[in-house]
Image (cartoon, rainbow, N blue to C red):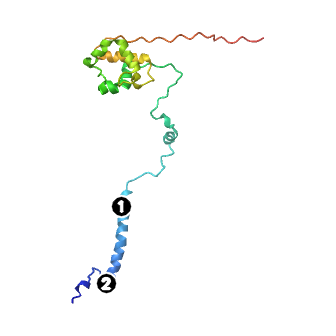
Amino acid sequence: MSDAHNEHESAIKTPKQLIAAVLAAFLIPIVCIVLLVQYVTNAQKTGAGSESQTPEMIAARIRPVADDGFTFRDSSAPKQLLSGEEVFKTTCSACHAAGVAGAPKVGDPAAWKARISQGYDTLLSHAINGLNAMPAKGGNPDLDDVEIARTVVYMANQSGASFKEPEVKAPAAAPATDAAAPAEKK
Protein backbone atom coordinates (compact mmCIF):
# COMPACT_ATOMS: atom_id res chain seq x y z
CA MET A 1 0.00 0.00 0.00
CA SER A 2 0.99 3.52 -0.69
CA ASP A 3 1.39 6.24 1.92
CA ALA A 4 0.83 9.04 -0.61
CA HIS A 5 -2.25 10.34 1.13
CA ASN A 6 -0.22 11.13 4.28
CA GLU A 7 2.40 13.20 2.50
CA HIS A 8 2.06 16.94 3.11
CA GLU A 9 4.14 19.67 1.61
CA SER A 10 4.36 23.17 3.03
CA ALA A 11 5.88 26.40 1.76
CA ILE A 12 7.60 26.76 5.11
CA LYS A 13 10.42 24.28 5.35
CA THR A 14 12.79 25.84 7.89
CA PRO A 15 12.34 27.54 11.27
CA LYS A 16 13.68 30.76 9.74
CA GLN A 17 10.85 30.76 7.19
CA LEU A 18 8.33 30.11 10.00
CA ILE A 19 9.53 33.17 11.97
CA ALA A 20 9.38 35.33 8.82
CA ALA A 21 5.81 34.18 8.05
CA VAL A 22 4.60 34.87 11.62
CA LEU A 23 6.18 38.34 11.66
CA ALA A 24 4.67 39.17 8.24
CA ALA A 25 1.24 38.04 9.44
CA PHE A 26 1.39 40.61 12.26
CA LEU A 27 3.31 43.45 10.65
CA ILE A 28 1.54 43.75 7.27
CA PRO A 29 -1.95 44.45 8.78
CA ILE A 30 -0.43 46.91 11.28
CA VAL A 31 1.41 48.80 8.52
CA CYS A 32 -1.79 48.89 6.43
CA ILE A 33 -3.78 50.32 9.36
CA VAL A 34 -1.14 52.98 10.04
CA LEU A 35 -1.09 54.01 6.37
CA LEU A 36 -4.92 54.24 6.27
CA VAL A 37 -4.95 56.41 9.39
CA GLN A 38 -2.32 58.68 7.83
CA TYR A 39 -4.38 58.93 4.64
CA VAL A 40 -7.59 59.81 6.47
CA THR A 41 -6.03 62.37 8.80
CA ASN A 42 -3.72 63.94 6.22
CA ALA A 43 -5.97 66.99 5.56
CA GLN A 44 -5.03 70.12 7.43
CA LYS A 45 -7.61 70.79 10.14
CA THR A 46 -7.99 73.43 12.76
CA GLY A 47 -7.95 72.34 16.34
CA ALA A 48 -11.26 71.46 17.92
CA GLY A 49 -12.77 74.51 19.60
CA SER A 50 -10.31 76.95 18.05
CA GLU A 51 -13.13 79.22 16.80
CA SER A 52 -15.65 78.36 19.48
CA GLN A 53 -14.95 81.42 21.59
CA THR A 54 -15.50 84.06 18.89
CA PRO A 55 -18.40 86.42 19.57
CA GLU A 56 -20.30 85.13 16.51
CA MET A 57 -20.09 81.51 17.63
CA ILE A 58 -21.14 82.39 21.17
CA ALA A 59 -24.10 84.39 19.85
CA ALA A 60 -25.11 81.47 17.60
CA ARG A 61 -25.06 79.05 20.55
CA ILE A 62 -27.12 81.18 22.92
CA ARG A 63 -29.65 82.42 20.32
CA PRO A 64 -33.13 81.08 21.15
CA VAL A 65 -34.18 78.13 19.04
CA ALA A 66 -37.61 79.69 18.55
CA ASP A 67 -36.06 82.48 16.47
CA ASP A 68 -35.46 80.10 13.56
CA GLY A 69 -38.21 80.42 10.96
CA PHE A 70 -40.87 81.98 13.17
CA THR A 71 -42.49 85.37 12.90
CA PHE A 72 -43.67 86.76 16.18
CA ARG A 73 -46.84 88.84 16.19
CA ASP A 74 -48.25 91.07 18.83
CA SER A 75 -51.68 89.59 19.52
CA SER A 76 -52.96 92.88 20.87
CA ALA A 77 -51.88 94.84 17.80
CA PRO A 78 -54.45 95.61 15.13
CA LYS A 79 -54.68 92.91 12.50
CA GLN A 80 -53.12 93.67 9.15
CA LEU A 81 -55.53 92.39 6.52
CA LEU A 82 -53.98 90.61 3.56
CA SER A 83 -54.91 91.32 -0.04
CA GLY A 84 -56.81 88.75 -2.09
CA GLU A 85 -53.69 87.93 -4.08
CA GLU A 86 -51.62 87.34 -0.92
CA VAL A 87 -54.26 85.01 0.57
CA PHE A 88 -54.54 83.18 -2.76
CA LYS A 89 -50.77 82.63 -2.90
CA THR A 90 -50.48 81.45 0.71
CA THR A 91 -53.68 79.43 1.17
CA CYS A 92 -55.77 78.89 -1.95
CA SER A 93 -53.13 78.20 -4.60
CA ALA A 94 -52.50 74.69 -3.27
CA CYS A 95 -55.78 73.56 -4.85
CA HIS A 96 -56.94 76.36 -7.15
CA ALA A 97 -53.65 76.79 -9.05
CA ALA A 98 -53.64 73.20 -10.29
CA GLY A 99 -57.33 72.26 -10.05
CA VAL A 100 -56.84 69.67 -7.31
CA ALA A 101 -59.87 67.70 -6.00
CA GLY A 102 -62.29 69.34 -8.41
CA ALA A 103 -61.33 72.91 -7.45
CA PRO A 104 -61.81 75.31 -10.36
CA LYS A 105 -58.47 76.48 -11.69
CA VAL A 106 -57.94 80.23 -11.40
CA GLY A 107 -57.74 81.81 -14.85
CA ASP A 108 -59.97 79.16 -16.47
CA PRO A 109 -63.21 80.97 -17.42
CA ALA A 110 -64.95 77.73 -18.42
CA ALA A 111 -64.44 76.22 -14.97
CA TRP A 112 -65.65 79.38 -13.23
CA LYS A 113 -68.59 80.28 -15.50
CA ALA A 114 -71.23 78.30 -13.59
CA ARG A 115 -69.88 79.47 -10.23
CA ILE A 116 -69.72 83.13 -11.23
CA SER A 117 -73.30 82.93 -12.55
CA GLN A 118 -74.43 81.96 -9.00
CA GLY A 119 -73.33 85.39 -7.83
CA TYR A 120 -70.81 86.93 -5.51
CA ASP A 121 -72.77 86.25 -2.30
CA THR A 122 -73.03 82.50 -3.05
CA LEU A 123 -69.32 82.29 -3.88
CA LEU A 124 -68.46 84.13 -0.67
CA SER A 125 -70.72 81.86 1.39
CA HIS A 126 -69.09 78.75 -0.10
CA ALA A 127 -65.62 80.15 0.59
CA ILE A 128 -66.37 81.08 4.20
CA ASN A 129 -68.37 77.96 5.13
CA GLY A 130 -66.73 75.43 2.81
CA LEU A 131 -68.22 73.32 0.03
CA ASN A 132 -67.58 69.70 -0.97
CA ALA A 133 -63.83 69.05 -0.59
CA MET A 134 -63.00 72.68 0.23
CA PRO A 135 -62.78 73.36 3.98
CA ALA A 136 -64.16 76.51 5.53
CA LYS A 137 -61.93 79.52 4.82
CA GLY A 138 -59.73 77.29 2.70
CA GLY A 139 -58.53 75.51 5.82
CA ASN A 140 -57.06 78.65 7.43
CA PRO A 141 -59.29 79.72 10.33
CA ASP A 142 -57.05 82.73 11.06
CA LEU A 143 -58.33 84.50 7.96
CA ASP A 144 -60.83 87.30 8.44
CA ASP A 145 -64.07 87.29 6.42
CA VAL A 146 -62.87 90.44 4.61
CA GLU A 147 -59.72 88.63 3.51
CA ILE A 148 -61.83 85.74 2.22
CA ALA A 149 -64.08 88.20 0.37
CA ARG A 150 -61.04 89.87 -1.22
CA THR A 151 -59.72 86.48 -2.28
CA VAL A 152 -63.05 85.45 -3.82
CA VAL A 153 -63.09 88.68 -5.82
CA TYR A 154 -59.45 88.21 -6.88
CA MET A 155 -59.97 84.61 -8.00
CA ALA A 156 -63.27 85.26 -9.77
CA ASN A 157 -61.96 88.38 -11.53
CA GLN A 158 -58.92 86.42 -12.74
CA SER A 159 -61.38 83.93 -14.24
CA GLY A 160 -63.71 86.27 -16.08
CA ALA A 161 -65.89 87.97 -13.46
CA SER A 162 -65.99 91.68 -12.73
CA PHE A 163 -66.78 91.78 -9.01
CA LYS A 164 -66.04 94.88 -6.98
CA GLU A 165 -63.56 94.45 -4.13
CA PRO A 166 -65.28 94.70 -0.73
CA GLU A 167 -64.68 97.75 1.39
CA VAL A 168 -63.16 97.34 4.81
CA LYS A 169 -65.24 98.87 7.55
CA ALA A 170 -63.14 101.10 9.76
CA PRO A 171 -63.14 100.10 13.44
CA ALA A 172 -65.28 102.24 15.69
CA ALA A 173 -63.31 105.14 17.13
CA ALA A 174 -62.42 104.71 20.78
CA PRO A 175 -63.83 107.35 23.11
CA ALA A 176 -61.40 110.17 23.76
CA THR A 177 -59.71 109.97 27.13
CA ASP A 178 -58.85 112.95 29.22
CA ALA A 179 -55.08 113.14 29.33
CA ALA A 180 -55.03 116.08 31.71
CA ALA A 181 -52.95 115.79 34.83
CA PRO A 182 -54.82 115.13 38.08
CA ALA A 183 -55.64 118.19 40.17
CA GLU A 184 -53.06 119.09 42.80
CA LYS A 185 -53.99 118.98 46.47
CA LYS A 186 -53.50 122.09 48.57
Q: Nearer the viewer, residue 135 or 150?
A: 135
Structural crowding at the residue carrying mark 2, measured as other residues with C-alpha within 10 Å and reported as few (<14), some (14–19) or many (≥20): few
Q: Position of residue 166 (x, y in %)?
A: 40, 12
Disc on res. 14? 2
Residue labelled with disc 1: 36
Please state, as top left, top right, bottom left or bottom right, where the N terminus lies in the image.
bottom left
Q: Nearer the viewer, residue 177 or 31?
A: 177
Q: Nearer the viewer, residue 154 or 35?
A: 154
Q: Position of residue 152 (x, y in %)?
A: 36, 17
Q: Position of residue 83 (x, y in %)?
A: 39, 18
The residue sitting at 44% across, 19% down in the picture is 144
Q: What amino acid is found at the position of numbered circle 1 in the picture?
A: Leu
Residue 17 appears left or right of 68:
left
The residue sitting at 59% across, 9% down in the picture is 176
Total count of labels: 2
Residue lying furthest bottom in this view? 1
Residue 105 appears left or right of 138:
left
The residue sitting at 33% across, 80% down in the picture is 18
Q: Are marks 2 and 1 in contact (CB under 8 Å)?
A: no
SS of the residue at dot 2?
loop
